Image (cartoon, helix red, strand yellow):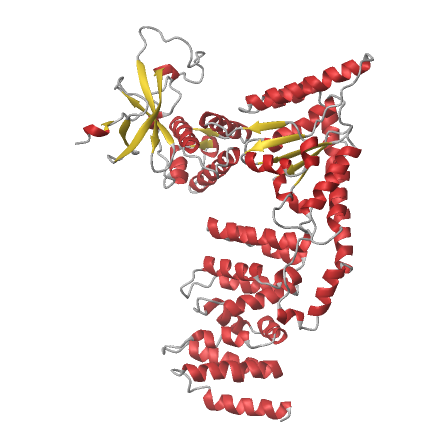
Amino acid sequence: MSDSAKLQALKERFEILKDTCLEDTLIQLSVSENIIAATLNMDVEEGMKMWEYVLTKYYGCEHTVDYHFFTDYVVQHTDDEALKTVFKTNKKIRDYVFLLDPYESHLDCSYFICSMVYEEEFELSEELISLLMRNNNGENDPQQNLYQVLHTILINTDTKWQISSAGIDFLQKYIPMVKDKIKRADLEVCMIDVVDSVENGADKGPMSFSLFTSDEGYKKFMDDRMKKDSYNDFMAERETKKASAGSSSAKEEKQINEKSLDEYKKELDSLIGLDAVKNEIDDLTNLIRIQRLRKERGYANVETSQHLVFTGNPGTGKTTVARLVGKIYHALGYLSKGHFVEVDRSGLVAGYVGQTAIKTQEVIKSALGGVLFIDEAYALAVENIENDFGKEAIETILKAMEDNRDDFVVIVAGYDELMHKFINSNPGLKSRFNKYIHFPDYTGNEMYGIFKSLLDKNEYSIAKNADVAIKSILNQVYDSRDNNFGNGRTVRNYFEQLIEAHASRIVKIKNPTETDLILITIDDVREVFEYSGYEIFESMNDYSENDETDPRTWDEPIEDDEEVFVYCGVHFHNNGNIYHYRTDDNTIKIGDEVLVPVGNSTKLKTGTVASIEYHTRATIPYPLYKTKAIAGKVEEEN
């Protein structure tokens, strides 16, 4: 049968069934897939007439109709080129399918948008996504529709093979629009994986069979394997990055040359906490200074390794200190530039044999004369994978450390246990990295200091009761910390949430004053922490009014007329955390089983006394939430 005869048969069949499929889903399915979609693939104009007719008729009817047969099913069985023409030219169909359809999936619509992103049809893609974001007719709300379409695209097997950097840029702008933090984080992880594969040379994974057997599929597969055009793109991108890095590096070098050693040391000393770290850096500085002085006066020069291992949890200041090390070493004359280049595994490791060494050498070249900082360096040594290219990066770095020992410093950083394991995994690493500097978690009071510095730096102030609440909350955060504790990053996240809450409150004020624009209030604190599980206190009755300026330390003698409080560190059995509570019972001993109140409730929890401390009102190191009286020994419960 000729195409014209087929088309005529489809038109006749449509005329018979177009008004009779209100209740029969099988007929709906047949009309959608076998007639409308088939017609669209042969004659777009004729198919559009059919599609518009059924959509107009059935969206306006009062019968129970499974609409997705007339939307998603047609999309599923129609060629992309035909759909592109329909959605570009027929607003009514476009609105019916993407704006009005109550079907909760929109899966095939999402796949069509995916294809349009591959083809860089961004104007059409943006229009269709905007319609889904306004579609509030089904079980999914617009936010779920947005998440669903982005997730469908990013996890699609073919995305890593077909999407361009322009496509990545297009999708990236939508991710911040997803309000749910968990869903947004999921999309961010997916996006990082796509970027890593498309732009950083990581493995793309298997190509789907449907793409492989398509006209362009095999060519894409072979081009990727041979790295011809894509390799040229990769090299061009590297040149762009190098030019950009060179520009920023030159600017950084100029800034470095304008400051003295004392200024950099003062900058280091101004960092909150990190006393042990500062002492370690001082020791290294003193060693370099004396060795240089000895060399100037004709004494033997003892060669020492200045490569460092920074260990500690995220957010403890490792990157900040590493950047300062480069500047200090430059001021001492040890490094010629003192600039800072930060990288992780994705910046060193490529997806194919031989490329990792080239990629790593380029990074090293950009860092010569300064500091190469490798974050989460343990990711370079993947166990039980014999052909992992991270080993190639390690060997390339080790050679560069040997060849450029007088003007190149490498600092590797990561979690304590993992970094020790990483260094011990390779004799070359162990011999070159023999200086470890540990970055401890920030205490609650140190986090409070970081928060205050963020306020000052960004020209905000905070009400007194809100200030008390933040101080107590940060101490609670510290005491309940786990392996995911973010340290300084946690403080910055809280700060950003508070200024968002502040902005949402102030925008409702018709004529805000200058004070309104800068003052964080207790209402902002409640908005951020109301459901966090942390207690919000607004009073410091159990603090000295001058606790921050009191010159005494906790170890100094207590005056005879000062009231003394007994504090117990109580170990809770169910979570392993230790909390401090005040008691008037001076017979309490370490090891006693006690009952303590939980928060503001009357509920009691059983714990074991793990420590006992004695403090006056002026030397109490704990915020108010820890001053609940111990309810009594367990045996007194009844």
- Seen from this angle, which residue lies furthest right? 298
At horizontal 73% and vertical 24% (from top left) the residue drawn is 304
**Of all residues shown, which one is farthest toward the top?**
560
Quarter holding the N terminus? bottom right
Q: Quadrant of the C terminus?
A: top left
Where does the image place residue 357, in percent across and percent down from the top left? 75, 46
* Position above or below: 278 against 212: above
The answer, for residue 348, to whether it is visible in the render is no
**Residue 523: image x %, image y %?**
38, 36
Direction from residue 10 to residue 636 in the image, left or right:
left
Residue 397, given in percent of the width and then of the height, sits at 73, 39
Query: Which residue occupies the foreground of this view, 53 or 354?
Result: 354
Give the image quarter of residue 46: bottom right
Count of numbered tags: 0
Q: Is residue 119 left or right of residue 449?
A: right
Query: Could you tell me if residue 496 is visible in this image?
Result: yes
Q: Which one is in front, 344 or 88?
A: 344
Give left or right: position of 186 versus 374. left
The answer to whether 265 is drawn above or below residue 563 in the figure is below
Above/below status of 5 relative to 255:
below
Q: Position of residue 93 (x, y in %)?
A: 52, 74
